[in-house]
């Protein structure tokens, strides 16, 4: 299993670093891609050095990955204008790859045209901007190979769900115990 994580300026740090950390703990390779720069500043002024650079669609070959991970944050408002990213999302979807979007990032799925007929969740303030799909108010929603989550507070739960889906329920349970995660 191998995932590509997209980091655009003003991304939500917890929503990016949590799945990156949890998935790597589960022995899932995750490569981070900075949009336009390898030095990406998050919405809370935390500088993250991406592994690779994403400037054009060809910079990421879906054939080399099993999943695309899209953190949210205020930077999503700029990413929805990035046609190369929207086309990359479409290519991952058409190839039957996993797509994970959290917080405002389901807006990218909507703009890429892949939410039609899908059930999803997102940050409550983003719902009104999404024109397709069926929103439900749940922390994590899985519809086929699209996994969505509501935000910062659901990032650890969602990351453990990815481990459950991509590795095993047992690995997810054991990892939850190792990081002292409790659902209640």
Image: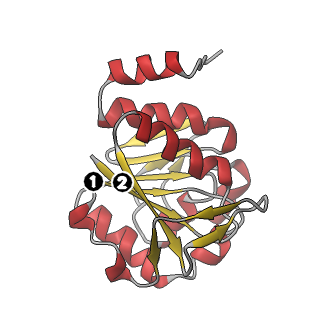
**Residue 35: % across, % down:** 53, 75
The residue sitting at 67% across, 53% down in the picture is: 13
Question: Which dot marks residue 82?
Answer: none
The residue sitting at 24% across, 57% down in the picture is: 96
Quadrant location, the C terminus: top right
The residue tagged 1 is 66
Q: How many marks?
A: 2
Can residue 127 be seen here? The reply is yes
Please state if 133 lies on the left or on the right of 128 as rendered.
Answer: left
Query: Element under label 2?
Result: strand
Vertical relation: 28 (above or below) 45: above
Asked if labels 1 and 2 touch by Cβ distance under 8 angstroms, the answer is yes
Give residue 81's quadrant in the image: bottom right
How dense is the environment of label 1, judged by Cα within 10 Å: few (below 14), some, or many (20 and up)? Answer: some
Give residue 94's quadrant in the image: bottom left
Please state if 167 lies on the left or on the right of 76 as rendered.
Answer: left
Please state if 125 lies on the left or on the right of 70 as rendered.
Answer: right
The residue sitting at 31% across, 64% down in the picture is: 92
Label 2 or label 1, whichever comes before in sequence order: 2
The residue sitting at 27% across, 66% down in the picture is: 62
Vertical relation: 81 (above or below) 116: below
Query: How far apart are labels 2 and 1 at the CA level?
Result: 6 Å
**Residue 80: % across, % down:** 57, 75
Q: Nearer the viewer, residue 66 or 94?
A: 66
The residue tagged 2 is 3
**Residue 178: % across, % down:** 51, 18
Can residue 139 be seen here? The reply is no
């Amino acid at each position: 299993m191998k995932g590509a994580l997209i980091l655009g300026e003003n991304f939500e740090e917890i929503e990016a670093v949590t799945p990156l950390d949890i998935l790597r703990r589960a022995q899932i390779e995750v490569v981070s891609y900075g949009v336009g720069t390898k030095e990406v500043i998050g919405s809370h002024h935390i500088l993250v050095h991406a592994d690779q650079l994403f400037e054009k669609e060809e910079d990421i070959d879906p054939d080399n990955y099993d999943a695309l991970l899209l953190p949210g944050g205020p930077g999503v408002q700029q990413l929805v204008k990035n046609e190369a990213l929207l086309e990359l999302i479409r290519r991952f979807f058409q190839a039957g790859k996993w797509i994970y979007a959290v917080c405002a990032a389901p807006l990218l799925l909507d703009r890429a045209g892949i939410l039609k007929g899908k059930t999803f969740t997102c940050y409550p303030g983003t719902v009104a901007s999404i024109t397709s799909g069926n929103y439900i108010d749940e922390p994590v929603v899985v519809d086929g190979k699209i996994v969505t989550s509501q935000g910062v507070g659901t990032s650890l739960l969602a990351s453990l769900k990815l481990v459950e889906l991509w590795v095993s329920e047992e690995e997810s349970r054991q990892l939850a115990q190792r990081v002292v995660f409790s659902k209640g």
